[in-house]
Structure formats: structure tokens, C-alpha cells
Image (cartoon, coloured by chain):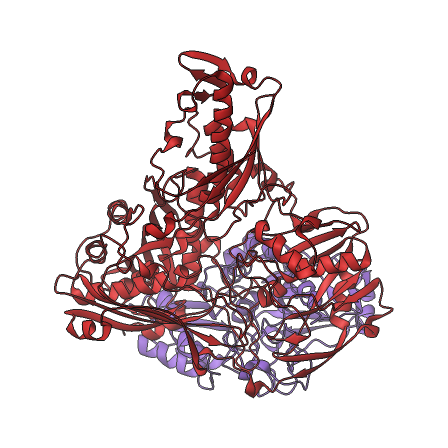
Amino acid sequence: MSHVFEMQKPDERNRLDAMKQGVIGQPMDRPDGIAKVTGTATYAAEYAIKGCAEGVLVTAPFTRGRVTRIDAGSITGMPGVIRVIDDARLITRSAQAAAGEAPDQGPLTVHYFGQPIALVVAERFEQARDAAMALKIEFDADDLSDVPLDPAAVETELIETTAQGDLEQAMKDAVHSVDLTFTTEGHASAAMEPHAAIAEWDGEQLTVHASLQMPNYNISELADCLGLEEDKIRCLSRYVGGGFGSKLGISPEAVAAAIAAMELNRPVRVVMSRQQVFQTIMRRTETEQRLRLGTDADGRLTAFGHEARISNLPNEEYTEPVVQSSQLLYGGEHRLLQIELARIHCMTAGSVRGPGEAVGMPVLEAAMDELAEQAGLDPVELRLRNIPDKHPVKGIPYSSRKLAECLEQGAARFGWDRGPRKPRQHREGEWWIGTGMASAARAHSVRPAQARVTLHVDGTALVETDMTDIGTGTYAILTQIAAEMLGLDPANVRVDLGDTRHPRGAGSGGSWGAASTGSAVFVACEAIREQLAERLGTSESALDLADGSCTSGGSKKSLRDVIGNREISRIGHFKPGELQEKYAAASFGAFFAEVAVNEWTGEARVRRMLGAFGFGRVLNAKTARSQCIGGMTWCIGAALTESLLFDPVDGHLVNCDLAEYHVPVHRDVPHLETILVEERDPVASPIQAKGVGELGICGGAGAIANAIYNACGARLRTFPMTPDKILAAMPE
Amino acid sequence: MKPFDYQRAERLEHAAQLMSDGATAIAGGTNLLDLMKLQVETPRTLLDVNKLPMASIEDDGSGLRIGALATNTATAVHPRVKADYAVLSRAILAGATQQLRNKATTAGNLCQRTRCYYFTNIDQPCNKREPGTGCGAIKGIARLHAVLGTSDQCIATYPGDMAVAMYALNAVVHIANPSGAVRSVPVREFHRLPGHQPEKDNVLEPGDIITGVILPAPVSGTHIYRKVRERSSYAFAMCSVAAIVRMEEGRIAHASLAFGGLAHKPWYDPQIEQSLVGEAPSLALFDYAADVLLKTARGYGENDFKIPLARRTLAAVLCEVTGVDA
């Protein structure tokens, strides 16, 4: 039985707080934790499947053009070689987030250096890899002088504009103003688990073990790629070793494995090498951003301009939403928010951890720091003065917002010195020490989601959905929601995820997974509670469930007795409704960082960092904190080290492994403190939760940049702020 | 990875014979295996030398003999190394990760190949990997690359840290040839500049096996290894300085300096030391020493920063050891 809940109006009932079990929000350990740390959690490539052949992708050694011949004969007779797959259904790149349909197919037309063009299948992995590298191909490569690679050198397309008032005039009239241009470099998701898939075909049914963030969309994408009906496909993704956007859409290895398995009638595994993941999956676009901010004499924004240039391949629709949170974070009557897109042939740009805000917010917040200096205001105060009453363009109210509380509580806990600031004030030996802050904001959204909850006759519950846990804590929070609603010890709740035979969840992406799929579990549990109430002849609202007992009207019964031999199973179906159009919904926060910069070498090291965040209900204080500090760690990478380097001649990705693409190492990450500000958002979801997954990355790199300036006086407008750039900008 | 034969050497003579027949020695494999997977290295025969009795670290009367197979970890934590050759211990600990250092060996580390992005990508031109194909880095991304001793064929850097300290210590490499004769090569002459033969990293000839490294009698002074990098661990040096400096009566009595991250080999120039010894330390003196170091330096755009960075890193190290206040 399916129960539908559509968000048509704010859900002020706040039911979870009225429940009696007391597990929601608790810092419960992950139920999947022990399996993961003991190596018994099975990831996509790790299923032991009899007779499994091994496939390795062949990638294009040129930038743009056509493969004219794949000479399968060139590897015939090499040990173990079974087949070269060059099927026209192979995909040239991953699908974009929530596409639900096939991405570009037809691998013989090459759009970027390193594009997959074929699959070599052999008995063993080493044989397949050797043969893939030995495979001879012939191609017509376009002259590189005709292939655009530099986003600054091509004409751009105007993608999106929000214009209000007269920004130019407002800038002229402003008492304090800044007009600054920043750049950020491309980022890779850099998930620990490489992309991998095993496909099995029994002549009727295709089963694919893959590392997926959103099987609910991926099954449609795979079906479309293959020309199969969805009901002939089962995707399994029980454990995912990090996604960060890279596994949102179906990717080349999964489609190749499926085609090979169907052609060969035997299971086929395809695992991408680290280099292939870097070179073919998704990049975050580099950006160039112009910030024009102007205020009145009191530091209140009157002019707000945020324009960004981004890039992507010619036939890709995805555009990094750089100005997403600039839409709603601060006021300013005269506004221009704009995105321009440059078409270049450097791999696919797509969603990489916190798309939009992860690069838009640090730049906005670095510009705000310069504005505060210009206006002689404390940076915290400048932000407090510019929190608008309602959405600055749409005029709609905020669903909930703890920005001011985050700024105030964060500043207090961090020990922020209020008042105007001057750089180069503190020195310890060779090191300049400084502090900086930034606001955090990340747009909130929810998606349709379904989950089945079954209350078994033994008094335990089972939650089933194809939702994934990509390291975020989904197993934990869905356990807690069901345990809270049904009055069970969490040990008596089992959560089964990542199987498309289960009801469709929302998938892990866009920070919407917890609020959406969590609400589906909530709806299913409400329906079960109603059934229990009916059996007890009482009303659902009068029913208290706790510790396996039902209490209503003073009488207490064991839950098992109420269930008897009739298990109760309900599907909860959560629908976003139109409420999202009527409110500005986002998660907010504030970052504070202390940074040391070496006077001699320009090396910058974060010494401590604090994030205060408000994102609706905290479903699990431990996994929520982990999400936040994970995001803050990425802030350190974005501020100081992470940068995709593309060859200027042929556009290939140069630093395509974890040795040369520098994510932060443990030593770069000091103690990270978090404040989770309590909040209930009745608009965001019936569980009063908003998204937290990406909030921690949305702005913190700006706090670090501002701290670098405060420390040593180097005002940089280019991320990442590597020692060479800091030295060049540091005053003598 | 290409199919290969695997053999295990039981005795040095046996190993030398196989290597003169074209076998490639493998010890820790921390660099070779990665390059084999990328088919940058395609040995037909891998010769596992780990059973050869060359892992010990022994006092040789005045100095210390570090066996070719001593792991980086064993060397870095050895009490004599820590006490008398601290710069070596510090350099090793500044490199890689604990797991890699547990496997990496003295000889393997000396022979570590460049991290140039074009060398490790077989779809790109590289004169070092495939002589005559050109250099992708000169026109491309040269951030990691050399500013000293480059040629129009190659601007790769030697990536290691251990060897930089050994240059400062004036260590000597013992190399056995197939006939069993052992020759001594000063480490400062072990690595090559690229010139017209960038494919040759060092002076080893086919059949040569490094048996150990001799550290001469210790020199008193302050030992420093300073490595500059954008992230604080598990990154190759943008620039590094190994220094042993002793002050006497307000003057620099001894200075021994070597530099990493700047060239196809650790950089050692006796004129730098000569410019310092006997002088009273000052910022002007350090600047002059940097002039000597960098007199032939040339940037390739992306790595231009290494020239001022090397100057500043040298000054930082010399300020630290001499007590000059910047």
C-alpha cells in the first residue's frame, strides 16, 4: 500500500519531536560502520562472480575528430583476449545529474582527449589492460589550431541572467564599493573508490553492480543507453566509496560492462583506472567571476553584481550554477547575476561536490571581505547588516534561516575580535598569523522519494529503498527515523539500500537525499502507525510508541502483540509539491579560520577552523558533523591546493592522479570545530530537515583566503592560493 | 603492464649477470610498479633483489654504510643517522608516506624517476621516455619542472628528498658491475643532467647494481632539511634545501648545501659554499649565495616562481642556522 504525502503547505505538526523513542538526532554510530572498517562491506567491483571476464576501457589519444578504424585484429592472439567492444551504444561521458536518459553515445566521434572509445575484454584484468593499451586504432584528428581549449579565448553564450534595477548607476552612487575579478580552477571529485561495474545477463535480465549515487535515475539512463526496458534491469549499489558528484549519472564503465555482458553472455567487470576516472568522468569548470558590490554609508548593500564565466563541452547542457546562493544570501536592490558559458574541448564539466556554491560562495565572501575593509566594518557586522527580510528578487519569505545565529555563535566560540581589521598584526617566528570568516549558504531542494517500511511479526522493522549511502550516513539516519516513529531500538531496524527492486528513493545528490528519502520513510511509518492505531481502536495521534510498546489512553501493549501474525508493510511516497516555489529555502552557516602564512616561502597552513551551521533538524549529530567537517576539509583543498591542470596544446588533463591532484592530507587538516544550530524547517520537509551534505564546502575557502590576507597582507583573487601566488602578492 | 618474467636473485653475481642481460631490478617497487602499470616501464624480466644481503646499516669506522636495500624507514630511524646525519633522516621523513617509506629502499630511491606529467603519460611526447618524440612539458604544464641545468630536450626534475641530503653529506655510491668489481661514485656525480640524452637519469650502465651508500665521517653543524610544498605531506618539493652549517666565532665555518626540486638532479654547487665560508652571516650574504645558486636559472613560464622561491628558501634556511634576524 502506498501512502502519498505532498508538501502543499508547511508541515507545522513537527511530529518527530513528539515521538517517544528519543533516538532522532542522537549521535548514533553508523550501522554500516563495522562492515566498512573491517573490509567486509562489498563495493561494486568486489563481488565474487563465477566466470567473470574483465574489461578495460580504451581512451582516445587525441582531442577532437573521428576514430576511423578499430583494428581488433591487432590484439587477436594476445593472451586471454576475448573481444573488442566498439558498440555504438557506448557512451562518451557520464550522464549529468538526474538526467534520467542516455548521455552522448557513439564513441567513434571524439570530443575530448581521453574519451572512452572501446572496451577490450579478456579473461584476466592484466590481460585486458595490456591488450587495451596495445589495440591499434586509426583516426582523423582535427587540427588543434581549430579546437577551442581556452575558455578566455572563445565567444561565450549567455545562459542565465537575473537583472533588477540599475547596477551600473548603483555602483556609481555607492558610498563604498568593490569591483573585483576572481578566478577559480577546475576541481575533480576525487572519490576514493574508482568507478567500477560488474554486469550479468541471463538472457532476460540484466544485473549491474555499480558505484552509483542515484540508482533511481541511473536505471533509466542505463535502460535508455541499452535500448532495454527498465524492468529488465536491476542496479545494485549497496556501498559507494565516495561520490562527490562523480557518480550521479551513469558512467562509461557501467554501460560498457552491460553491453559486453549481453554480447558475450557472461559476466563482465569493468574498473576504471585512477587516471581514467580523472580524465573522463567529470570536472568542475574553472570560473572567472566578477563581483560588483556597493553599499550606502552604513554598509548596507545597494548594488550586487555577480557574473561568472564557466565552460563545458559543446554539446553539454550542464552549467555550473555559480550564482545560486548569491540569489538569496544578501540584499541589494540593484542586482545583476549572470552566467556565461564558453564551449571548449576539455572533458565534460558536471556536478562536483557543492556545484555552484563551492566556487561561487568563496568568491562572494572574499569580495565581501574587501568590501568590509573598504567600509571600515567588521566582516561579521557587514554580513549581519545585509541579511534581507525576504528574497531580494522574488519577495518570498525564507523557509527558515539561522544565518545571524551562525555568525554570532561562531564568532563567539571562535574568539573573533570584533571591529575593523588590519593585516599583518600577528607573527610567530617565520609565520604570519591571521583570521578570516565567511558566510555559508547552499540552496535546499527535495525530490520525489519512496521507501517501503515493514514491521515484521518479530517486532523488527525493515526499511527498503534504492536510495544510497555514499559515505554520508543514510543507513544511520533512515534507521533513526524509522526507530523514532515506530518506537523501536535502532538495533531492531534494518535498512536495505541501493537496490532498484526497492521503491525509488531520491538518490544521493544535491544535498537532497536525507530530507527527501527520510521523508518517504517518515510517511511510510506514519501509515504503519495508523494501522497500529486502527488495530488498537484508537487514533494515531493518541498512540505513543517506545521500546517496542504501544501506549494509548493509559493502556500499554507490546508491539509484537499488536502486530500478531499480520506484518504491516507500507510504502511512503514523498512529493515536493509546489511549496518550494513559495519560499526561499536554503541551509546557512558561517566559517571562521585561522591561517599561518610563511614569510619566506608563502606556504599557508590552516591552524584551526570552525563552522556553525543551521540546516533544519539534525537527524544524527555525528554523521551531520562528519558531513560538515568533510566539507570544511574540501574548503582547505579549494583554498590552498586543488587545481585541475589542462595541457594548453591538446587540452588533456595533466595531473590525473592523487599524487599530483592535491586534495588535503591529514596534516593539512587541523581540528575542525562545528556548531550545529538547532532549527526546525516546516517548509523544507515533514521531518523539518534541510540539506547538510554540501553546506560545509560552500564558502569556507573564502574564510581561508580572507585569513591569508589578514595574516600576511597578500590579497589574492585566484584560487587555489598556492605558495607561488602568495609570495607574488605578499608585501615586502 | 606488459607480461614479464620474474626471477629472484640469490647472489650478487647472479643478479649482475641477469641485469647485464637486460633484467630490471625491483626492490620496494614503489616507483617501478606504478610505471609498469602505465607502461612507461616495460621490463621483460623483473629481478627481485630483495634476498641479497644488502639491507644492513653499518658503522665503517669513520662513517656509515647504508645498504642498498635498507628501507627509507630503517635509515631514517637509525640512531647513528639521527645523531650524526640528521639532515638525511629529516629529508627521508619529508618524503612520501610512512607506508611508502617502509617499502622504498636506498638504491631504489636514488634511481627514482621523474614525476613529469608527460613522462608518465604514454599518449604524450617525452624525450626521456621515448627519445626523439619531443618534450610536452616545455610547451605545456611545467609547474613541477626544472629551472637549473635544463636542455631543449628535457626539463624534468629529480623528485626525491633522500638524495638531496646525501649530496649535502657528500656521500659515495658503491656500484658493482657484472664482473664483480665495485666502483665508488660520489653521489654528486651519480645523477646526470638531461643534455642530449634525457633518457639516462644517472651513470649506471647495464649490469650495474648499487650495493650501498657510504656516508663520510660526520661533520658537526646544524642539520636542516627544508622542503617547500603547497600541501604539508605527500607532495614533491617545489623546492628543497639540505643544509649542514657550522658557525664559529660569529662566522660561517662550514657550509654544505644541496637543493631539490630545481633540476634533473639534486643541485650541488661548491661555489655556493665558498661564497659563505669564512663570512659573517647577513641577509646580503645570503642573497649573494642565492645569486651564485641561480646564476644560470631559467624558468619555463609556469615554474618561474621557483627562482625567487629558491632564493627565499635558501635565505630562510641560512637565517635559521646562523641566527640572522630577517
Question: How many marks overall?
Answer: 0
Q: Between A301 and A517, which is closer to the camera in this rendering? A: A517
In this image, A425 relative to A570: left or right? left
Tell me, yes or no, if residue A241 can be seen here: no
Q: Between A476 and A457, which is closer to the camera in this rendering? A: A457
Quadrant where the C terminus of chain A sits is bottom left
- Can you name the residue that lies furthest to the top here? A555
Q: Quadrant of residue A247?
A: bottom right
Looking at the image, residue A589 lies above or below residue A363:
above
In this image, A339 relative to B193: left or right? left
Looking at the image, residue A696 lies above or below residue A502:
below
In this image, A293 relative to A123: left or right? left
What's the colour of chain A in the image? red
Residue at 35% of width from left, 42% of height from top?
Answer: A9
- Percent position of residue A72, x then y: 81, 72
Q: Quadrant of residue A468?
A: top right
- Percent position of residue A280, x then y: 60, 67
What's the colour of chain B in the image? purple
- Can you name the residue that lies furthest to the right here? A77
